[in-house]
Each structure stands twice: as C-alpha cells, then as structure tokens.
Amino acid sequence: MKTKSLVLAALSVTALTFAQKKEIKSAEKTVESGSFVQAQTEISGLEGMMSQMDEKEKEYYYFIKGRAFLGGEDNKKSEDLLKAMEAFTKVNEFNDGSKYGQEATQYKQQAMNAVISSAVDDQNAEKYSDAATKLYKLYTLTPKDTSYLYFAASNAVNAQDFPTALEYYSQLKSLGYTGVETKFTAKNKANGQVESFNSKQQRDLFVKSGTHEDPQTEVTESRAGEIAKNIALIYVQEGENDKAISAIDDALAENPDDDALLRSAADVYLKMDMTTEYEAAMNKVIAKDPNNPGLYFNLGVGAAKADDMEKAMGYYEKALEIDPDYSAANLNIAALMLGKDKDIIEQMNTLGNSKADNAKYNELKKQRLALYGEAVPYLEKAIAGEESNIEAVRTLYNIHVQLGNTTEADKYKAKLDALESK
C-alpha cells in the first residue's frame, strides 16, 4: 500500500507539472495574440505555483511573463516595462546558456530603452522624483551600469529629495564610481555626423574601410569631485556642517591633487563662508591652470562675499589681465566702483546749507560723477558680448543721464527698451 501511494503521489505531481506547462503555454498564446493585459493576468496567476516548477519551467515562466509585461512596441508604461526587465533578468538565472537567453537579452534591452526614454521625458517635464525612481530601478536590474545610479542621484537632488540623493551618492562613493569613460569617435563621410564606437578596433576598422575619417579618442572627466561636493552640500543643506567638512576632507585625503575635487571643495568652503580654506583650494587649482581668468574671478567672488573688497578688486583685475573682455569680471569691477557711491551720498545727505557745506557738497558731487565716468568703460565691456546684461544697460543709461551725455543716454535707453520688450 505504501508503494502504491508513492506512485500515486508521483503521478499527481507529474499531472500538476503538465498542467502548469499547459497554462504557461496558454499565456504564451495570449501574448502572441496581442492581448497583453489578459496575458499578464494569466501568467501572474501561476506565481503561487513557482515552488512546484522545475528549472526549465521557471525559465519558461519568466520568459513569458517578461513578454506579457513588455507588451507591444508602443508600450510606455514604465511599471510594466520594469517588471518585464526583472522577468527577463531572471531567465538566465535558472539555466546557464538557456533556451530563451538570447531572446530574453534582446527583449530586456528593448524594455530598458523604453524606460530610459520615459525617464528622460520625466526629466524634461521636471518630474524629477519619477525619473529618479525609474533610473534607480534600472540600476538594480543592470548593476554594472552604474551611470543609472549617478543619474538617479542627480534627479533626486533636482527633486530636493536630499535623503535619497545622499543614499545614492554614498553608494556611488562606496563603489568607487568616477564616470570616467574613453570614447572612440570618427566622422561619417556620407552624412558628416560624428559617431561613437564600442572600441578603438571597431572605430579603426571603419576608418580603414574608407567610410569614416577624423578618428578621435576622448577621456571624459571624473565625476568623483562632483559626487564628493554634492554629498557635502547635502550635509550643508541639512545643517550638518561637520559632516560636510568631513566628507570633503576624506575625499581630498584620498585624492589631494584631483582638480575637479579641489574645485568642489572650494565650492563647499565658499558655501560655508570658510574663506581661508576656499582660497587655499582655489590657489591649488590656479597653480595647475594659471591662465584661466575664471579662477581669479571666482576668487574675487569669494573675497567679496567675505567683505574684502580690496582683495576682490585685485582678483577681478587679474582676470582682466588674462582676458580683458571677460564680461563678468568687468561687470563686478564696475559694481565695486559704484558701491562707493553709497558712502558719498550719505556724506552729502549730512551736509547743511553753509558756504563750507555747499563747497563740500560740490566736491562730493564731482567725486561721484568721476566715479561714474570710471565705471563706464567696464560696463561697456560687460555688455559687449552676445547677450547684454539688462541691469548693466540700465546702469549705463542712468549714469549718462547723470553725466549729462544726452546722446549716450538716448542710445542706452533705446537698448534698454528693446531688452525689456523681449
């Protein structure tokens, strides 16, 4: 009797297995008919039977599940597409070199491309939280593609979800992620477009065949500095200044000469009003790039923020020594000059009507007009670029009115009216 019951049990298991295969096959037919929602219901109904399936049946189950949630080419439901990716990912977990492995990989890529497109649409629509969620899920399904984690963190920052952004950035830091890539490109002779290739060998093959020209190899900048900076800035945002300083100091201890990291450290120090540390970091950057006017300009901004206007002026002037047409430096020098106007006006307002006070008033007025005249060339340089600074144009108009330069005043009034009408 015992033996018979075992035989009966075995037969029942075989019958159950056959029924499962039949139901998966039925779901497959539903997929082939294009009834994807119905197929999702059918295949999801088998989930409770997973423990009774063998490896091949599980592989089959996940493959059909993936196809059911992948749907047609017009499917844009990211939730379904991510489920499809997850199912296709599992296909090869059960059978190495599986029957459905190659197709599953292709379908997974199709789903991934659709999710990426959806995340980009979210970014463009400023739905940053949704984009971050999708990109992080992509990362969990394709952990080798750490760039998804990086972009998920960036979108979390834009969504002002700082705890989530900090979590993602911390993961990137632990992984040693830098984002450094070597890109191999060449220009397509037929359409003039610059195209990227997976390897130098592939690129060179196309160049040798004569279809492409101008081969270029580019190594992208490291994102490590940006990540360290963002971690620190999130701590600043959350009021945890000690952790912010610690994050930057730890990063600099590992990479003391990393240019991007030094710039990031300077940004954090400036944000925290740590002027001495800011200048020290910026001077290290300048030592590597002494002919960059923007670096001196940034030092000027830092000095002005610390209320050291004399030092700020010196930095702005150094920027103009390198590039006399540097618009922002010209504008800030003019602003520093005109900032002295406030003190002159205050002195004028304290004067009475005596002969001595009137003489003093006239002297101060001359100083004021002379100050305006000194600022004019810098303001003119500041608006000489492609896009005029509307406030600089307004200031020039007001100055020429004060100086009695009617022709110049009319010119800048017309320019101001044109800018304000845009």
Image (cartoon, rainbow, N blue to C red):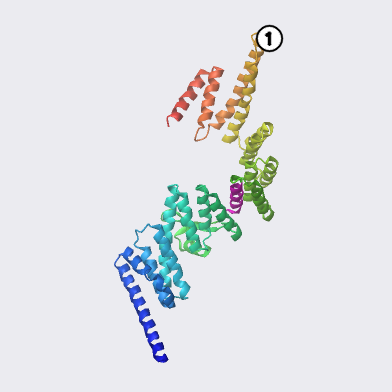
* Front-most of residues 193 and 81: 81
Is residue 410 visible from the viewing direction of this image? Answer: yes
- Callout 1, which amino acid? Ala
Residue 75 at x, y = what percent?
36, 59
**Dot 1: what SS?**
helix
Which quarter of the rendering shows the N terminus?
bottom left
| Residue span colored magenta | 219-235
Residue 343 at x, y = what percent?
64, 22
User: What residue is rendered at 45% in x and 70% in y?
Assistant: 90
User: What residue is rendered at 55% in x and 18% in y?
Assistant: 402
Q: Give the answer, above or below, for where 289 lies relative to 148.
A: above
Residue 331 at x, y = what percent?
58, 32
**Left-right relation of 417 to 45:** right
Query: Which residue in the structure is indicated by mark 1?
Result: 356
Q: Main secondary structure of the magenta part?
A: helix
User: What residue is rendered at 33% in x and 76% in y?
Assistant: 22
Is residue 220 visible from the viewing direction of this image? Answer: no
Image quadrant of residue 107? bottom left
**Left-right relation of 177 to 57:** right
Q: Give the answer, above or below, for where 232 lies relative to 362.
A: below
* Front-most of residues 47 and 72: 47
Q: Give the answer, above or below, for where 232 lies relative to 17.
A: above
